[in-house]
Image: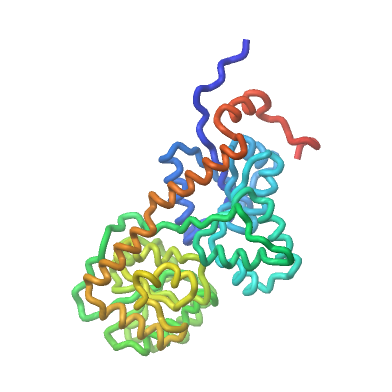
Amino acid sequence: MPEPMPLHIPRQVLLLTEESGLGGVQTTLHWLESGLAERGWQVTRLPVRRGRPSLWTCWQAARRAQVLVASNNFRPAYAAVALAWLSRRPSVVWVHGPLHEVLQQAGASSLKTTWLRRVYRRASQLVCASQTSCDSLLRVMAGVGFEPPQNLSVIRNPAVLPGAGQGDAAMPDTEVTALGFVGRLSPEKQPLHLLSMLRLLPAAYQLHVVGDGELMGAMRSAGQDLLAQGRLHLHGQQTVTAQTYRAWRATVLCSRYEGYPMTALESLACGVPCVSTPIPAMQEMLATQAPLWLARDDSPTALAEAVQRCLAQAPSDRHVAINRLQGQHRLENFVQAWDELLTRLLHKAGQGPKKQALELDASPDEPPSGGRP
């Protein structure tokens, strides 16, 4: 006599990841994992680069899950789509950055672009972290006879940080005006622009740079005078907390392109305004609630002017703008949108708890047709 079927099989998602350590993607993944767990999902992480298990182990993990999610849009996407095909599960590709600009910067060949199009077209769902990322993805997907995919949605990343409060941060009552930057010191972030910006600001302004990268040497060399004056502080890579942001009057971004920068969202979550070059992602984030925080162009002069405009605002006006921006990027809305999307995919694929229980009971280790992978 067969054993009775379990009354409840938890909803299970397999999260395929590539990156590790610090960074905006990892921060967002943490909030997704913890939020889904609170809503009854079992989330399993599986690395696809360093420490990747065998294909057989990957396939078994895919079979145990009900839906596969690629944490970003390159190697995890390839793995998610392939494993989903083998295990007959729905797959989601999560696109964080502006794909078109990233591929252009990398000098990607037309062959790679064609390959990416094919991968993304085979995903059950595409999720973009911002409308900017969505528009960029569509430019990559465009071609002869192109029609926008119906399985494309935008779920904006949340503004949240451990220990972050609401409203304006308590600013230090000193004669120093501290600004901050958090991010990789890489060409697309244009950190050297910050040095030119700082020289255009009054002597009371200081800049604190948190992060490391290939341009750290150039920052030290080009900023020798500012370092000697005590106006520039290069802190290197370190854990960022709410207290990091709250020590500053504003956070500054000067990127060439971004998907939807976590630095800006974290700063806002701590009650600290974020001033930026007018890239599409930051226009999307700030244009309706805080247009004065956007520079008129990407020059250091325009950035310095935007910093001064922002800090010349009445504190009450900054408070209102930050509260509204926080309201547009609530963690509960982010998690709810993902929960609803994943649940919808399960129902569409017929991968409900009852079917999952039958599959696990019948053949937990049966390989896909064609033999053991």
Locate the N terminus by quadrant: top right
- What is the quadrant of residue 210 in the picture? bottom left
Q: Is residue 15 visible?
A: yes
Instruction: Please provide percent x and percent y for residue 140.
Output: 65, 66
- What is the quadrant of residue 204 in the picture? bottom left
Colour mapping: rainbow
Rendered position, 368 above or below 124:
above
Answer with left or right where residue 274 lies relative to residue 312.
right
Say which residue appears at 69% left-offset and 60% top-offset: 116
Say which residue appears at 57% left-offset and 42% top-offset: 345
Say which residue appears at 56% left-offset and 47% top-offset: 15
Locate the C terminus by quadrant: top right
Instruction: Please provide percent x and percent y for residue 98.
Output: 56, 67
Q: Nearer the viewer, residue 292 or 81?
A: 292
Answer with left or right where residue 157 lies relative to residue 175.
right
Q: Pick out the residue farthest to the left.
A: 173
Q: Is residue 224 visible?
A: no
Q: Pick out the residue farthest to the right.
A: 370
Say which residue appears at 29% left-offset and 88% top-offset: 203
Answer with left or right where residue 92 lies relative to residue 323.
right
Instruction: Give the total number of marks visible in the rendering.
Output: 0
Instruction: Please provide percent x and percent y for residue 87.
Output: 68, 39
Q: Nearer the viewer, residue 22 or 335?
A: 335
Instruction: Please provide percent x and percent y for residue 237.
Output: 44, 67
